[in-house]
Structures are given as structure tokens and as C-alpha cells.
Image: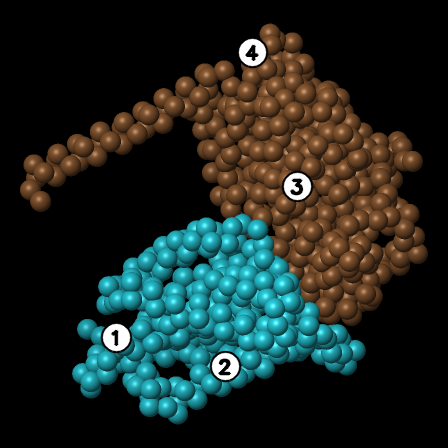
Amino acid sequence: MSLFAVLIDGTIYASWLFLVAAGLTVIYGVMRILNMAHGSFYAIGAYTAASLVGWYFNNGIGPVWAGYLLMLGCALVAGLIVGLIIERGLLKFMYGRDEVLMVIITYALLLVLEDTMKMIWGVNPYFAYQPYAEMGRSALAGLKVSNYDLMLVGVSLVLGLGLYLWLERTNQGKVLRAVIHDREVAMAMGVNVKRMFTLVFVLGTMLGTLAGALTAPAISVAPGIGVEIIVLAFAVVVIGGMGSIEGAAVGALLVGLSRAAAVHYAPEFELFVIYGVMALVLAVRPQGLFGRVLARKI
Amino acid sequence: MNNYKKNILKHRLTLAITAGVALSMGSSAMAAENGKFRIGVVTFLSGPAAGPFGEPSANAAKVLVEGLNQGKLPAPYNTIGINGAEIEVVIIDEAGGAAKQVEEFRNLVQRQKVDAVVGYISSGDCLAIAPVAEELGAMTVFYDCGTSQLFNEDKTPQFVFRTGLDAAVDNIGAARYLTKTRPDAQKIAGIQQNYAFGQDSWKDFTHSMEQLMPKAKVVESQMPKVFQGQYGAEISALSVKRPDIIHSSFWGGDMEALVLQANARGLLEDATAVLTCGESALDRYKDQAPNGMVIGGRGPFGAFAPDNELNRWFKDKYQAAYSTAPTYPASKMAQAILGLKHAAENAKVEPGKIPAPQEIAKAFKGATFESVSGTVQMARAGGHQAMQGISYGEYQYDKASKKGGVQNVIAFSGECVTPPDGTAALEWIKAGFPGAQCN
């Protein structure tokens, strides 16, 4: 029973981690920006979904399925708007700067966004539980599992597969991979790198807000959730290799299963296990599981 | 820009900053000498504790001070302000950690010249502030932090008082409630936030259960990171052990998320949850918490407060101002300010004059005063720590009004749940509560 519970819990947690980390790794892979503000995108998605979904269900506006569409739609629109404003209004003036400077800039952005959210949504928690509760639960080998959590596994599988196919099978994906491999050569071959940057940053932001929106019905959306999540997302991305989608998936699975095993068999190590896995992976492969060793240009 | 212009600009900037600082210092000094009784109120205005605790506390301070300044409170608080002096409140954010709070405290006392500081939710902040308050001779009332260490470290307090209860009382009360309502429970589990408050709560609860219900055994203990939000694995780990009781000292968003997720997965149908801070989300659980879930309010506060004239006034004014009932943090803030008013007005100084911290402290020590929660006795830690009873009850959701409430409430007296003066709470529990007087 416990082993089965570890597998189920680990997979659910891993799918949530992947949703949270996907946007972070996409942005780093293409733009080489270690985006500290990703946690704020997650929080914006969560707040937008929680406030709109709460309003929708509390006032009995329409059918339940439309509430789910509203949840996803508002997160994607919020991500699109926020991503465009930040990329066009701030980041485009910073391209080509040192990676460390970009960390500081995005950290400043995180602080600004945290206060902006406080101004918009206040400090009281938002509790939009209906999408989570409406789905009910299933019994798997005697273990009661929320159907919403199982749905999250499906969403992250679809999202991961979609991202993979987009990068591997489409022309736009090939161009993007060219930018990832060598920005200067891609530019010399006529690729509009700046446009690709805008596209990728907005995509990464939308992934962040989507993760927040999908999480919102299962939690109480309160100030600080974005800050909490960023450390976890970094751990997953570092384990998998910065900038690698498949790395983020494997990293999330490793962390998810390890954490679930710790919770079931040795709860006292639960806090340590995520960073223990990260330290172990980095000791063996400093570039992460799927990271490439890059030759330094002189 | 040439050097001359740069120098002029720098000079003007320096002048502007100097003038700004001088003005702000002047205004604070003036405010301190304007005949008003200045209270520094410190509570969380940002971060995860702001919504469930900080905002209700700050709102309570505003409602109460407004009422006091108008002299509209019921007796014995129907006199204007404090000792006739109008009350002025300076509200400070508690976020940022103990080091920042010590700095803010010094600023409140030394620069803003407050006459008293009322505040602090975090036990870490209380432990850091207490020695500084004693050093500065600043009248300080802790209204919420529950650490049992407070008066173990500040052994001879002079200026530090706590009108909230020691956190051990929460867990002794919870165990006593289970003894009365679920005497047949066999399997106990717990889930706490992994920091001092969570660990101490679990220790106090399990030792209390050992004494009161020796047949009940601990089958699982989970300590997830504070603000984790996702408890899927923890809920599974608790489920597979099939406990009868699940004790938790979770608070804020973590508590609401745990209740939602555990209830959706059927865990709270199979086991009774005991939430020591559960009352703070009474209006928010709706139908997502099961009826019969045991909740506490960290004393006779919030929904557990008695139906006295003071509390009726407070509840009405709070409800009118913020369209919601005051939860326990709000009651606790009101209690601290009322305690301060009681002490300052019993310091025997001329009406309209503001008593010195020594005079207030002398009157506060060992005082008995009326509050929104009933009668409060400063009967522990040499008269610096409040002793009151604690109540627990079961959550009940009314579908018609869409409101949550409490039923099957049992109140335990202060003498039943509080260790004698000079005895550490855990020692008292382990010794089997010697001298406890329970009804």
C-alpha cells in the first residue's frame, strides 16, 4: 500500500512541479535569463484564477465546465499581458547584459510584482475550491485520490508532450533550437532573434500563470506563494539541466518520487530530500541530467 | 553635466534629504509631545500571516481606538481615550524577521516616542523584543505570540506583559476536549508546520494525551515545511495509518489548504481533525470542512468569546466596519489594548496626564481586568502573563445561511489548563497536571 501511495503521490507532485518549472526552463534555455520573477507569474496566475473562479462559482454564473475554461483562459490572458509588458517594457533594453545582472533585474521585478499583487488583491487569502471539489475523488487500490490531482497529471503530460513536439517537429521549434544552440549563428542565418525572445518570454510567462491557475483551487492563495515556489522550481530545473524540457520532466519526477518516499518512510528527511537529490545530481553531473557542457567562447 | 552642476545638484539633494529627515524627526517629536497617548501597534501587514492574523488585528486596533477616543465603549471602559488623553496609533508591519523588528521597536520607542507598544504574533519576534523592551524601559504588551520560552528567558520582567495565552494551553485544552468528547479514540496522528510552534504544539499535545488518554497511541507524525501548500503525500501517509484523530497546529493558508485537500480525499470523514487555530478561518471553510471538525481559538476568543456587553459592542462595531465577524486575533488585540487602558488608568496619575512606563507596569502587574473575552487575570509569570480558560468546539456549517459556526463548545478554566507559576508547561504535563482544577 505504501509503495503504491509513494508512486501515486510522487507522480502527482512531479506533474505539479513540472508545470511550475516548465516556463522557467524554457526562458533560460533560449534567453539565458535566470528568471527570478517566475514565482510572481505563478502567483499572478493563481490570484487571477482564484478571484475570477471564486466570483464565477459563488454567484452561480454558469455551468461548471465553463468555470474550468474560465480558470485556464484567464491565466493564459494574464500571462500574455504580463509577459508582453515586461518583455517589451523592460527586458528588451537589457538583452546582451551579463547573466548575473539579469538575475538581479528579475529579482527586482519579483519584488515589484509582489507589492503590485498586494495592491490589487490585498493580503487576505483567496479560496476558490470549487474546481477542486467538483471533480470528486477515486479510490485506487484503497487509496482515495482527488480526481483534480489526477487531471493535473494528464495536463502536465499533454503540456510536456506538446512542448516537445513543438520544439522537435515544427519549423518554429527548429528555429528556436537553433537560437538555443548558437544565438549568433542563428542571427547570422537570418533568424529574428529578438522576435523569438518575445515569443519565448511570453510563452514562459503563460506557462507560469497557467501553473498558478491550476494550483489555485487546491490551495489558499495568499501573499508569498510565488516566493515559496521559486526555490523549488529552481531545484527541479537545476537537476534536469538548465534549459531542458525533458530535463525538467525527469527532474520533477525524481524530486516528486524522492519526496513522497521520504514523507511515507522517513518524514524527518522530507525537508532535506529535495536538496539532497539536487546535491547528488550536481556532484555527478554539474550541468544537470540533460544539460550540455558548453565550450566557452573566447 | 559639468562638475559645477553636479556639485550644485548634490548640494541640493543633501539639503532636501536633511530637511526631510529633520521634518520627520520634528513631526514625531511633536506628536509625542502633543498630549496624546501614542501606541505602537505591531502586526503582520504583509506576507502569509497578514490575511488570517495581521489584518484582523490591525482592524481591531482601529475599531477599538476609535471607540475609546469617542468614549463609546461600555463600562468599565466608557471614559475617553486612556486616562483622558486621546489615543494615537502607529501601525508597523511585523514582517521581515526578528532583527528588523528590534530595529523597528527601537525606532518606535526612541524616535517616535510611543507610550506603549502592543503587538507581535511571531514567537521569534517576542523573544527578540523582550530584552530590548526591558533595556529601554518601554511598556510592551504581547498580544498573540504563544511561546512558552518567553518568561523562562525574561525571568524578572518589569515592562513586558502578555495578555495572550501560552501556546501549551492550546494543546492541553485540545487533549482535554478529546477526553470529554472522544474518550474511545485509539489512534492519534499529527501534522504540523516544521518550525518551533508546530514542533512544540505536537510535543505538548502528545504528552497531554499520554496523561489523559493513555490508551491512545501515536501512529503517524508529519512535519511539512511551513507554507508548503501541497499536502498530497502527507494526506496519503496519514490515510494509510487510519487514525481516529488528526491533530494540527497549522494556521493561515496552510490550514485552509490542508482542510480542503484532506476533506476532498475523504480523510476527514474517516478521522476527526483537531485544529488548534481552526477558529481563524471559521467564515472561510464553508462546506469544504466536515461538520464535527474540532476547532480552537487559542483561548476564549473570536467565536468562543462570551456574550458580554463589551464583546457585543466589539462584534457589532467590527462587523459594521469590515462586514465580517472578528476572529480570535482581533479579540486578542482588543484584549491587549483594554488591558493597557486598565493599567494606565489605575496608575493613579492626574486625569489627562500620561503615566510613565514604570507607573503603568506597576498597575498592570497582577491586575484583573474585563475584556471582550471575559475576565482576565494577570496571574502567571509574577503577574506579567495572563491566565484564562480555553474553549474548543465542533465546526458546523449551516447550508441555509451559508455560514460556519461552532457547537458542542466546552470551556476549560484557566486553572485547569495553565501550569502553576514557576513551572514549565511540559514538566507540568509530564507530571500529570498536578494541582489542576477542572470543572
Q: Position of residue B251 (x, y in %)?
A: 66, 51
Q: Is residue B350 above or below residue B265?
A: above
- Cα separation between marks 2 and 4: 69 Å
- Cα separation between marks 1 and 4: 69 Å
Q: Quadrant where the N terminus of chain A lies? A: bottom right
Badge 3 amino acid: Gln
The crowding category of the residue bearing disc 1, from other C-alpha atoms within 10 Å (few below 14, some 14 to 19, many at least 20), is few
Residue B362 image-quadrant placement = top right
Q: Which residue is mark 2?
A: A159
Q: Which residue is mark 4?
A: B353
Q: Is residue B394 above or below residue A298?
A: above
Chain B colour in the picture? brown
Q: Position of residue B360 (x, y in %)?
A: 62, 17
Q: Is residue A16 left or right of residue B319?
A: left
Q: Which mark is residue A194?
A: 1
Q: Nearer the viewer, mark 1 or mark 4?
A: 4
- Do residues under tags 1 and 4 come within 8 Å of each other at their CB atoms? no
Instruction: Tell which subunit mark 4 falls on.
Output: B
